[in-house]
């Protein structure tokens, strides 16, 4: 259903800092999979689109904010897969404003944008609200906000392959928790999985634990989530983070976004400087895409 435009590849990040600390740091370029459905969004949508087709649906419906990577990717994936798509967008005040680049792209892909007030949007998991949407828009295959469900986790298990078991630590950014859950489920017990929260607060650990318990009977203990590098919360940033991203891109020719991957890489560098990784470790950072977030920056 979805095409891989370029197979992900791994490249080492050459830094004197890492060499001095006795570490090797690599990045897996999942962002290269697809020009518009990149990284973890491709992984999350892969099996969901297959299931939608198996169930005979021709329409996808999902939820997101005005700058949502998920809305952007779902619109593109739906068009490529031959589906109609509906995006329930948080914020009814946006209906009377010019569309930003994310929403403009989604509409160009054929997505019907439905703006709702924040109170109504908060009912996105209520059966009565979903039934009202079906009455209004007809039958659809529903994708949750952020795209995280068991099929998404199944897809994210495929981010790592057998060759990636050589890495001691695997790092990724965390939003809804689906990506890190898939990575955790795919690794062996000798690897440590370190997530970097893009959101303010300490709730994501519980969210990931629930996702794993719902997904698998196996108990996973080789993971943790760092909450020190959110830079004020989801989509928040400051000059320090932007300077780091610009400098990293200039020296390594690897693009980062300020919502997810930029915060992860900043966190990795900071933890290395603080000697929180033991010398001799091989560290793999997952580039989960999300570069459309740079469109609106």
Image (tube, grey):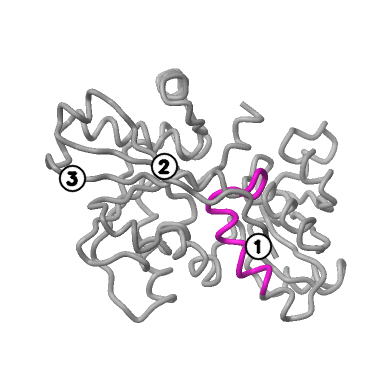
The residue at the far left in this view is 279
Q: Is residue 76 above or below residue 1?
A: above
Q: Quadrant of the N terminus?
A: bottom right
Tell whether label 1 touches label 2 (CB within 8 Å).
Answer: no
Q: Position of residue 140 (x, y in %)?
A: 78, 71
Badge 3 or badge 2: first in the primary sequence: 2
Residue hosting label 1: 123
Residue hosting label 3: 281
Residue hosting label 2: 200
Q: Quadrant of residue 177?
A: bottom left
Q: Give how far apart the Cα atoms at labels 1 and 3 are.
A: 45 Å
Q: Provide the secondary structure element on which disc 2 rests.
A: loop
Q: Give how far apart the Cα atoms at labels 3 and 2 are.
A: 29 Å
Q: Which residues are magenta?
A: 34-50
Q: Position of residue 220 (x, y in %)?
A: 28, 69
Residue at point 68% right, 60% down? 2
């Amino acid at each position: 259903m979805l095409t891989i435009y370029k197979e992900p590849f791994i490249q080492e990040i050459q830094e004197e800092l890492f060499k001095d600390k006795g570490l090797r740091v690599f990045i897996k370029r999942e962002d290269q999979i697809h020009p518009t459905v990149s990284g973890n969004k491709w992984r999350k949508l892969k099996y969901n689109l297959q299931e939608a087709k198996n169930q005979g649906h021709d329409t996808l419906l999902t939820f997101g904010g005005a700058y949502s990577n998920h809305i952007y990717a779902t619109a593109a994936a739906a068009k490529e897969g031959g589906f109609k798509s509906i995006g329930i967008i948080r914020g009814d005040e946006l209906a009377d404003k010019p569309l930003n680049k994310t929403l403009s792209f989604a509409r160009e892909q054929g997505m019907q944008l439905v703006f709702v007030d924040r109170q109504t949007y908060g009912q996105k998991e209520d059966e009565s609200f979903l039934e009202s949407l079906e009455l209004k828009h007809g039958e659809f295959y529903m994708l949750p906000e952020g795209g995280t469900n068991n099929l998404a986790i199944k897809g994210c298990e495929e981010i790592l392959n057998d060759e990636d078991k050589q890495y001691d630590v695997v790092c990724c950014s965390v939003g809804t928790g689906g990506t890190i859950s898939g990575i955790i489920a795919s690794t062996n017990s000798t690897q440590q999985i370190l997530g970097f929260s893009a959101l303010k607060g300490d709730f994501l650990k519980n969210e990931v634990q629930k996702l794993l318990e719902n997904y698998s009977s196996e108990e996973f203990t080789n993971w943790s989530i760092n909450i020190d590098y959110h830079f004020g919360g989801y989509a928040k940033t400051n000059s320090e983070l932007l300077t780091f991203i610009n400098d990293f891109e200039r020296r390594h020719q690897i693009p980062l976004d300020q919502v997810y991957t930029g915060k992860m890489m900043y966190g990795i560098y900071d933890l290395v400087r603080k000697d929180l990784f033991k010398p001799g470790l091989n560290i793999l950072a997952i580039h989960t895409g999300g570069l459309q977030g740079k469109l609106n920056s």
